[in-house]
Amino acid sequence: MSPNLYPGAASDLGQGNYSWNPMGGNIMSRSPMLGARLRRLRKDRGLTQVKLAEILGISPSYLNMIEHNDRPLTVSLLLKLSEALGVDLRDFSAGDEVRIKSDLEEALSDPMFGGTRPSAAELDEFVTSVPDICRSFLRLYRSYRNSREDVEALTDKLASSPYLVASSHSVRTLLTSVRSFSEILLDNIDLAAAERQQFLGIVVDGTEKLTLQVDELLRFITGENLDNLLDSRTPAEEVGDFTERNDNFFDDLDRRAESLRAEIGMETVGLFSRLSEVLRDRFGIEVETSGAGDGNRGGAVMPAVRLEPGPGGAGGRLIVRDDLALPSLRFHLARETGRRAAADLIDTWVGEAELSPASEDLCRDYLAEYFAAAVLMPYDAFLDRARAYRYDVERLSQAFGVSLEQACRRLATLRRPGEEGVRFHFLRIDSAGNVFRRVPGSGLPIPRFAGICPRWNVHAASGRPGTVDAQVLQLADGSAYLSVAFGQRRPGSGYNAPDGSYALALGCRLEDAGELVYSGGLDLTRSETFLPVGVTCRLCERTDCAQRAHPTLIHAVERGPSASDKPALKTARKQAASLSD
């Protein structure tokens, strides 16, 4: 599929804000940030507008309009930039800046900012002009959020831990003792020398005990790991940012996985045995199965996979639980194969990601899982079948011998230029609404710092395993997305490890919904049939929502505080009422 223009962008001279997503090969009508990026590139290269316009074969005035987002930066101009200046087209993907803008909007909805809400145009200008400052602000905000959550967690811990209650009492007792004897020494200058020495000894001894008690208390509270409290992002957030920057697509891993699958055969039947042979013959790793409780005491359940390295770290045994479903067994073997068969590619990606040391192992895990999905669902074969089945996830999971979640996650990675599938978003939530996995590939904003809108249909599906629910969700800005929610059950491993429920959501923009089998029976043309939703409560403009958990920031900012809302006036009224009584 070659790059194409959406309606309204039929030529280089068309009006509007458009940008090309080089990872996907499409002009994206909602990405207004490439003009500033082109201007920065020109200045970094020391080029005048006249010189760059000459290179691109356009007039300086037209280039000036492009730099100010009054004209689109088209595919043909991007290709000329790439050829003439050696520009990596991935540098012109607006995905990172769109993500930054979305994160800024969400962060600024925090009540701590007191109603600060820049307009969309102001945010666009800020993100394109000073992206590094925006990233620094988000790091600072994450640090604030983490610190606030740590304080809340420690408060709960202090209130509920018997040890901390007793330890706190001991600290207070020692403080009282030290203070009392210090005051005696200060107020009674005529104490006998022996008595003064005795009291000084009590103060010194109490101070030493207090120091030891406080040190022990701090070690208990912090786990001697205060650095973790200062990190601006968790490892999961770092890896998530890395995958989003790369559009959740790693073509070299895909192609190596395809080559491996072609070698061992495309048939699903017997794939577990063939992957076991690859691990044994190429990497000296024997695959064994074991019961869920083997080698454990007290009802403990062994991990799904356990690697016991051989002498010197070479080879070894890969022990997998025999109660796992066959799709999970295949996936674990494919992932362990990927750690070794694609180790050089994974190391390269991790090196380029510039992650913190704590995040590198998690990133390797993610890339190995990406490789595993590409082995089980090779790109070309999976995309062809997905189109033939109209993206019917259940049929795809059966055809490739994978779980429903594995098929959903794979659909969200089909980004190969010229061979791109529908751009999906994907998320998984537990029964409490916590988001465990998020891929905002369709453009639907999935919040990072707050809970997702309770009206999204994924919530209702989380408590109903087997449910498949398709709805069109419409945000307040008019954008609409088809969302397909799947209620899922996680089987337990016995009495001590009961089962649980969760939900998956797979969706796309309304423009692509007709390609999905799940759009059948839905009227995609009448907006009055769509489900009105928000992103998160504080960013939602809807005033008639019965499920609102927090007041919206938007209307408060637009109205401004009324006289009756002002805290000082409220306090004065309370004082006046008490005096009149």
Image (cartoon, grey):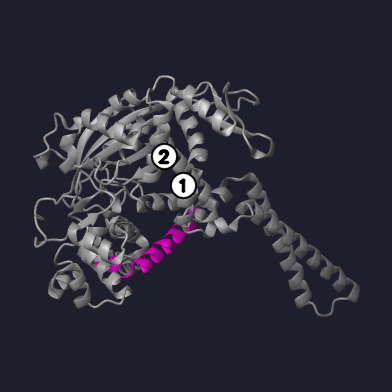
Asked if residue 549 is positioned above or below residue 562 in the image, the reply reads: above
Q: Quadrant of the C terminus?
A: bottom left
Quadrant of residue 253 in the image?
top left
Asked if residue 455 lies left or right of residue 242, the reply is left
Residue 166, image x, y percentages: 67, 49
Which residue position holds label 1?
345
Distance in Å between CA atoms under marks 2 and 1? 9 Å
- Give percent across and percent down for residue 52: 22, 73
**Mark 1 Cα-neighbour bin, 10 Å: few <14, some 14–19, many ≥20:** some
Q: Which residue is the extreme one toward the right?
A: 194
- Residue at 74% x, 72% y: name it: 183
- Residue named by callout 2: 256
Which residue is more in the foreground, 559 or 1?
A: 1
Residue 154 placed where, x, y %? Answer: 55, 52
Compared with residue 441, is residue 196 higher up or lower down, i.e. above or below?
below
Identity of the residue furthest to the bottom in this view: 189
Where, quadrant-wise, is the N terminus in this rendering?
A: top left
Circle 2: residue type: Arg
* Residue occupying image coordinates x 32% and y 45%: 452
Q: Position of residue 372 (x, y in %)?
A: 43, 35
Q: Are marks 2 and 1 in contact (CB under 8 Å)?
A: yes
